[in-house]
Image (tube, coloured by chain):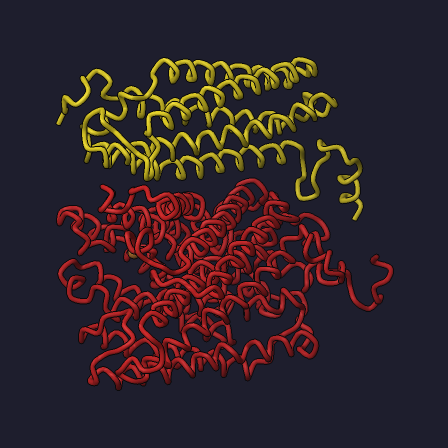
């Protein structure tokens, strides 16, 4: 088929795949696919958010007490780091749009560094939980108020939600490495930078999840003195 | 490679390559559809074998064939294999994969690699489920209710849960691929309201796959984490709430029933219009009723929890919304009947499945309304009435639809006709066997026989024996097609591009279709099912 072989000429990633008629159609399909993927992610995290909200209402005092033990300065720092990384990611996409190869690489590397910084801080926070026996399991202890069993539930959800979020960051870091490698070879041009743009959507999504996690886990009920009970 | 092929055979997707690699690494949606066909047929056989165990045990009132634990494992494995590894992928992954790109006039789905990945993901999940069965099975029921599944069961919950979790992603990938393809890959002139209703049905199905599956995935993940680390999300002993599991589980698993039935509803519209040579009556109503079923389906999950400490007001709302699902379902049935009425009906095998489907789906749907009534549900909750109801939908509906679809598009897939006489015989065996199997279960349930027990009082024996005999007839009806369909691959009559005189794009390309589906991209100029016009012109000339 003549129209067919014309598509499949180069091994270049920008080449039009055979099922598409135009580059625009190909890009539109990728974008819609990415948004749909992000919607599935929202539903995935949604189950955990629902569980958290249900138990926070049921065991309000214990959840507030447990929330008080989280390190708000570190959480705030991490929030800032992530917002900055969203900015550098947006800059990387912009650089791809205007075709500045070295700046794509620069901003992708900056995004990777900020992501790594976030994960590093998370490690410090997790280590702190281990020290204080705040990790759910046989050695769990909680003396800061409320019912220890319910505080354990809080920490189960804390580790579940932030852990799943961190997993998304780690996967993102892996993809970033690939993007950096490809960008340095000059694969991304103003005509074709779909992977950078799609990864940008993913990265912003992961940031937004944290924007919800941070107040939910760290801040809500922070004005209440520990063990005061709001209900 | 094409030069090596005998010149008399035209180039098509089947002879594009014969080695294993050309199948296992194929990006062609049609070949991937066939990969799914073989795999799910295997799972269907496996799930059926577990059912044989169940029906044998229930021949006699005492639990004399299997111990109660073994029996629990039999019905659990039957449910899990049939639901997650046969029914959910059946029509979408086989027929949908094969037909959606062709019906919308595209060369392939939007993401062929993702499509192949979804099959591999499915096989990994399936392998885990099978290995769980080999390691001794699982006994939680297909619903994985907590805290039994998360804390107390000593069977292979972890392996099975991981298998189901992984398989969920194949469903998500398929749904995502369909949605993007239907949005972005339609041929010129193929507007939304010219799409075949099969496509509308799959659009609605895909919405459920994409929105619902992640929720059950995270729920099963939580069960797994709870089992491994002894945290108490669902375990009341640890402060958790087992009813939360039920909410999360049914948020997906009620809509999952529509993943199974909506594609079959789409198949029916295609078969009925083709075999009556009429446009589907009320096209837009039928199209939107698919979407309405998908949307409403997300708002009714609480009808599974009338006796699970749910507040009576919540139950009331869930009950009313469940009744509302009856409206779009009835719209479909009435529109089909209106299509058949005064159509020139021909009784090919697919049409026999279609008639069977309409009857069984109606019975299944109406008994669903019984179950949505709070008072009656308390009486028949967890009885064989429920079992009969959902088998009327999932077996009477979904599998009749699947078999109808296989027969209807078999000539397209392989270029050969199936033999009509054995096919009609099988269709009748399925219909009669099905009713013999499951109608007595309505009576059993109404009389109070609970589900999931391997023994029962003597007065229930007559119905159980009927059910087991019916199941044997049903099994025969399911086995027959394997033989004559395989036979037809070599010996069947050559089908030609359009054996049924259908109007869809899939009938405008050779059978079997070439790898890129069409010689050149088709341009669509008229609505789906424009039969009248065609025949009118025929009369004129
Ligand atoms: Cu339901």
| A20 left or right of A231 in image | right
- Residue B374 screen position, x and y as percent: 16, 58
Is B342 situated left or right of B233 in this image? right
Residue shown at the point (26%, 82%) measured from the top left: B62
The percent coordinates of residue A201 (x first, y second) are: 52, 27
Q: Residue furthest right?
A: B3
Whole-percent x and y of residue A156?
33, 35
Q: Nearer the viewer, residue B425 or B478?
A: B478
**Relative side of A149 to A99, left or right:** left
- Residue found at x 73% / y 53%: B519
Can residue A106 be seen here?
yes
Q: Can the viewer see residue B392 in this picture?
A: no
Residue A121 on image: x %, y %: 45, 19
Q: Nearer the viewer, residue B49 or B298?
A: B49
For the C terminus of chain A, the image quarter is top left
Display colour for chain A: yellow
Question: Ligand 1, what quadrant?
Answer: bottom left
Q: How many marks?
A: 0
Q: Which chain did the image draw in red?
A: B
Q: Which residue is depicted at the point 71% across and 36% down?
A: A16
Front residue of B408 and A37: A37
Residue shown at the point (32%, 39%) measured from the top left: A138
* Image quadrant where residue B410 sits: bottom right
Compared across the picture, whether B75 is left or right of B31 comes to: left
Position of A25 relative to B419 (above/below): above
Above or below residue B463? Residue B122 is: above
B139 vs A192: above or below:
below
């Amino acid at each position: 088929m003549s129209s067919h072989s014309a598509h499949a000429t180069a091994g270049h990633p920008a080449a039009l795949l055979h099922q598409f008629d135009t580059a625009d159609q190909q890009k539109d399909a990728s974008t819609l696919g990415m948004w749909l993927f992000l919607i599935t992610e929202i539903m995935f995290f949604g189950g955990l958010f629902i569980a958290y909200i249900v138990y926070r209402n049921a065991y309000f005092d214990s959840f507030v007490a447990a929330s008080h033990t989280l390190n708000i300065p570190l959480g705030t720092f991490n929030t800032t780091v992530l917002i900055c990384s969203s900015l550098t990611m947006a800059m990387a996409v912009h650089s791809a749009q205007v075709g500045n190869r070295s700046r794509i690489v620069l901003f992708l590397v900056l995004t990777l560094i900020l992501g790594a910084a976030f994960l590093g801080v998370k490690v410090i926070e997790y280590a702190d939980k281990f020290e204080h026996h705040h990790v759910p399991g046989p050695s769990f202890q909680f003396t800061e108020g409320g019912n220890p069993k319910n505080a354990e539930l809080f920490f189960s959800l804390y580790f579940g939600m932030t852990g799943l979020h961190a997993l998304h960051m780690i996967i993102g870091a892996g993809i970033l490495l690939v993007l950096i490698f490809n960008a340095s070879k000059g694969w991304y041009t103003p005509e074709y930078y779909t992977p950078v743009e799609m990864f940008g959507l993913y990265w912003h999504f992961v940031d937004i999840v944290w924007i919800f996690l941070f107040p939910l886990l760290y801040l809500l009920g922070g004005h209440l003195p520990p063990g005061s009970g709001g209900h | 490679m094409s030069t090596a092929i005998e010149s008399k055979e035209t180039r098509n997707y089947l002879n594009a390559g014969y080695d294993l690699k050309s199948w296992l690494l194929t990006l062609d949606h049609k070949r991937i559809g066939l990969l799914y066909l073989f795999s799910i047929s295997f799972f269907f056989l496996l799930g059926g074998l577990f059912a044989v165990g169940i029906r044998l045990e229930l021949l006699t009132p005492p639990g004399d064939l299997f111990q109660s634990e073994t029996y629990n494992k039999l019905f659990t494995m039957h449910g899990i294999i049939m639901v997650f590894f046969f029914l959910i992928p059946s029509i979408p992954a086989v027929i949908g994969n094969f037909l959606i790109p062709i019906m919308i006039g595209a060369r392939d789905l939007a993401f062929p690699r993702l499509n192949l990945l979804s099959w591999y993901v499915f096989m990994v999940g399936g392998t885990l489920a099978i290995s769980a069965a080999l390691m001794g099975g699982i006994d939680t029921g297909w619903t994985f209710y907590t805290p039994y599944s998360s804390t107390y069961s000593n069977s292979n919950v972890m392996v099975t849960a991981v298998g189901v979790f992984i398989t969920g992603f194949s469903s998500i990938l398929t749904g995502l691929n369909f949605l993007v393809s239907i949005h972005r890959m339609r041929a010129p002139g193929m507007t939304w309201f010219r799409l075949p209703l099969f496509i509308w049905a799959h659009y609605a199905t895909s919405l459920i796959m994409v929105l619902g599956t992640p929720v059950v995935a995270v729920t099963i993940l939580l069960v797994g984490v709870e089992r491994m680390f002894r945290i108490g999300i669902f375990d009341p002993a640890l402060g958790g709430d087992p009813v939360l599991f039920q909410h999360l589980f049914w948020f997906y698993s009620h809509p999952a029933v529509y993943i199974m039935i909506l594609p079959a509803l789409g198949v029916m519209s295609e078969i009925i219009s083709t075999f009556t040579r009429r446009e589907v009556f009320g096209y837009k109503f039928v199209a939107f009723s698919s979407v309405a079923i998908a949307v409403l389906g997300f708002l009714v999950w609480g009808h599974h929890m009338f006796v699970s400490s749910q507040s009576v007001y919540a139950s009331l709302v869930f009950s009313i919304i469940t009744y509302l699902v009856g409206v779009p379902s009835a719209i479909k049935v009435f529109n089909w009947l209106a299509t058949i009425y005064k159509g020139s009906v021909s009784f090919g095998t697919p049409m026999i499945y279609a008639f069977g489907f309409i009857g069984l789906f109606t019975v299944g749907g109406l008994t669903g309304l019984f179950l949505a009534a709070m008072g009656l549900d308390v009486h028949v909750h967890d009885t064989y009435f429920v079992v009969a109801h959902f088998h009327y939908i999932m077996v009477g509906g979904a599998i009749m639809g699947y078999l109808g679809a296989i027969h209807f598009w078999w000539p397209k897939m392989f270029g050969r006709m199936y033999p009509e006489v054995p096919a009609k015989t099988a269709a009748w065996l399925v219909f009669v066997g099905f009713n013999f199997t499951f109608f007595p279960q309505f009576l059993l349930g109404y009389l109070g026989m609970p589900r999931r027990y391997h023994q029962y009082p003597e007065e229930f024996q007559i119905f159980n024996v009927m059910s087991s005999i019916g199941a044997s007839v049903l099994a025969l009806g399911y086995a027959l097609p394997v033989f004559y369909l395989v036979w037809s691959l070599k010996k069947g009559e050559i089908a030609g591009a359009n054996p049924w005189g259908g109007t869809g794009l899939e009938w405008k390309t050779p059978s079997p279709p070439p790898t890129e589906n069409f010689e050149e991209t088709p341009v669509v100029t008229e609505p789906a099912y424009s039969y009248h016009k065609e025949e009118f012109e025929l009369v004129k000339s």
